[in-house]
Amino acid sequence: MQNDVARERLRELILDGTYPPGARLTELEAAAALEMSRTPVREALRALTADGLVRPTGRGVVVVALEHDDLDDAYRVRAALEALTAETAAERQRDGRIAPADLRSLHEVNEATAEATARGRFAEAVALNRRFHRRVAELSGNMIALRTLDRLWDQIQVSTLRSLAPPSRPGHVSAQHEQLLAAITEARPEDAARIARAHVLDTRAATSGEA
């Protein structure tokens, strides 16, 4: 549907910083940028408002970023949900409910993420990192958690665009991914939850200049 296409294209432009926090956007401007009519763009902007990426202003919408305290809260919720999905994925692995091919795909994404990080391909590493964590959530089978995480990841990405930088400790990030992957593969739910939670909170500390 045109509405979905418009929403996804505008979402991508917000997430990649083309429209950064504070940027104002009208239906007319967005329709021209997407080369679409205003009706699907109007519906797309309504959906992005519901997602928390933009808010209505006097004329059109403005891209929003979470304030410091709200961003802290978002990371805490993300940490709790990623702990849950990692734990559940490990439980499903223990119960034989994850296909070998699905688990192999998680290993492949992890390897690609580590390689991009090590080679300094930062933009690629950021995208692959999100894919790795999303894959864990998919393997948990908890679609409510996955949909909530998708929204949180978007809000966090927009809110940290200006502070994003190559990780100061890429080896530490890759090691945590390896530990999480091992805990899921070896069906250790409690370890998977603990590692996932610590990883997200470490990420928050890094973006706020505390680590």
Image (tube, rainbow, N blue to C red):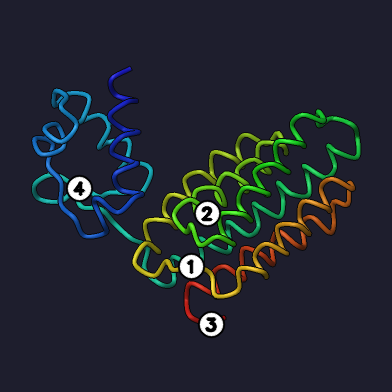
Q: Position of residue 17 (x, y in %)?
A: 30, 54
Q: What residue type is labelled 2?
A: Ala
Vertically, is 71 above or below 41? below
Which numbered disc, 4 or 1, marks the residue that appears first in the sequence?
A: 4
What label does residue 166 carry, if any?
1
* Disc 2/disc 1 C-alpha distance (Å): 9 Å
Which numbered disc, 1 or 3, marks the residue that appears first in the sequence?
A: 1
Q: Which amino acid does label 4 sit on?
A: Pro
Q: Residues within 10 Å of mark 1 (few under 14, many from 20)?
A: some
Marks 2 and 1 in Cβ contact (< 8 Å): yes
Q: What residue type is labelled 3?
A: Glu
Quadrant containing the C terminus is bottom right
Q: Which residue is drawn at 48% across and 67% down?
A: 166
The residue pinned by badge 2 equals 125
What label does residue 210 carry, if any?
3
Q: Nearer the viewer, mark 1 or mark 3?
A: 1
Which numbered disc, 4 or 3, marks the residue that appears first in the sequence?
A: 4
Left or right for 67, reference 125: left
